[in-house]
Amino acid sequence: MSLTVNGRRHRVSADTRTSLLDLLREDLDLTGTKKGCDQGACGACTVLVDGRRVNSCLTLAVRLDGAEVTTIEGLADGDDLTPLQEAFIAHDAFQCGFCTPGQIVSGTACIREGHTGSPAEIREWMSGNICRCGCYPKIVRAVEQAAGKR
């Protein structure tokens, strides 16, 4: 199969049971996307597929022939961080950092989808991403700032 990951075309062969998460981490060596619960409950593995957020641990890689995938590694332009990545740093919106890649990818989609009208709306649309350290208020502020709401 063939798919584009972070702007680069890849031809890969994968077992029909291989998740997108495992393909990214094990075959393409893109380890920024984290394996958390491996059951779709925590959001640590969130990536964009054709612009939409997906839990890569629940997505079969073979279903993505021709798709465009964006991981945390594909958001920044070299050393130039995205506004959301900068806002995460400015608001100290991470502690252990494990959930941060999924939070940033999900927050990027949240902003693109226009779900930033209020802190409550941001919390609702980011609710699929769990932060075990409890940095939610800082994450919401970072999304607000990157969306131009702060």
Image: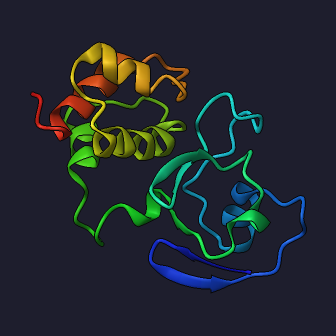
Q: Residue 50, how many percent across, how many down? A: 50, 61
Q: Residue 76, how many percent across, how many down? A: 32, 63
Q: Nearer the viewer, residue 63 or 105?
A: 63
Q: Count of labels shown?
A: 0
Q: Quadrant of residue 132?
A: top right
Left or right relative to 62: residue 2: left
Q: Residue 150, how many percent across, how many down? A: 9, 27
Q: Residue 96, how many percent across, how many down? A: 49, 32
Left or right relative to 87: residue 124: right
How is colour applied across the structure in the image?
rainbow
Name the residue rendered at 73%, 33% in the picture.
Answer: 37
Name the residue rendered at 16%, 34% in the picture.
Answer: 145
Q: Nearer the viewer, residue 138 or 56?
A: 56
Q: Nearer the viewer, residue 67 or 24?
A: 67
In the picture, the quarter occupied by the N terminus is bottom right
Where is 43 relative to 28, above or below?
Answer: above
Q: Nearer the viewer, residue 83 or 111?
A: 111
Where is 77 relative to 117, above or below?
Answer: below
Q: Quadrant of residue 4?
A: bottom right
Q: Quadrant of residue 9?
A: bottom right
Name the residue rendered at 75%, 64% in the picture.
Answer: 63
Left or right relative to 113: residue 28: right
Where is 123 relative to 38, above or below?
Answer: above
